[in-house]
Image (cartoon, helix red, strand yellow):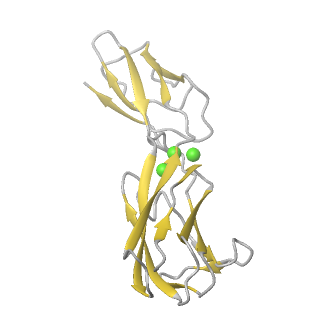
Amino acid sequence: MPATIAVNNATVWEGNNLVFDISLNHTSCYAVTFTPSLTSGTATVGTDTGTPVYYSLDGGGTLITWTGADITIPSGVTTVTFIVPSVNDVFDEQTETFTITASVTSGNTSNTSASGIGTILDNDIEISGTVFNDLDRLTDFTVDGTGTNAGGLHASLTNPVTHEVIACVSVNASGTYSFNSNYHSVMENTQY
Ligand SMILES: [Ca+2]
Ligand SMILES: [Ca+2]
Ligand SMILES: [Ca+2]
């Protein structure tokens, strides 16, 4: 009876490795060759996932860099361990997913492909806070970091952050407003 190929799901906090088992439900008398592919979902392959991608034919003892080529499961072996790094970025995001598919190109299996879902859990805090314009609110377009600037705007973050923040700040008539940002690196200000 031909073996069935399967791929499990994997879930990690971002920055950790997603470890997938691409497996046959029993050993085969013949080698089975498959093409692995990663497909973006809400997670973007190559942005939310990193390189190098490794695989192993001995449960992770020997890691081989995956170059995009087909992988052969030798006769007598049932599991290929496939290891995809996730990227620890600085953005506050929803949980993101991508799909890993193993498409059989040679060998005798009962199915021709199998897929699993990789789930990346975000580890970044929501950036939110409050900005007050205490001087010259109609002409002040500068918000400089989290302190008080010379123009009279000061912004404070609700939560501490470990990286710089872009905040798109909208000023309302009362001069009081809040911002919410997923951006990084520079602060900018939009006045309404
Ligand atoms: Ca991400
Ligand atoms: Ca992060
Ligand atoms: Ca993130």
Quadrant location of the C terminus? top left
Compared to 67, does 133 lie above or below? above
Q: Position of residue 107 (x, y in %)?
A: 45, 88
Instruction: Give the mark count.
Output: 0
Name the one closer to the observer, 113 or 164.
113
Residue at the outermost right position: 61
Is residue 70 in view from this perspective? no
Q: Residue at x 70, y 77 (%)?
A: 58
Location of residue 55 (image quadrant): bottom right
Q: Residue at the location (61% across, 29% down)?
A: 160
Image location of residue 180, percent across then percent down: 41, 29
- Up/down of 29 relative to 139, above or below: below
Farthest residue to the left: give it: 192
Quarter where residue 140 is shown:
top left
Quick check: 175 above or below 114? above
Q: What residue sits 59% from the left and 41% below the top?
A: 163
Tell me where residue 184 appears, x and y as whole percent: 48, 44
**In the image, farthest residue toward the front:** 1
| Residue 177 shows in this picture | yes
The image shows residue 35 at horizontal and vertical percentages of 43, 80
Q: Residue at x 63, y 84 (%)?
A: 76
Residue 126 or residue 185, whichever sits in front = 126
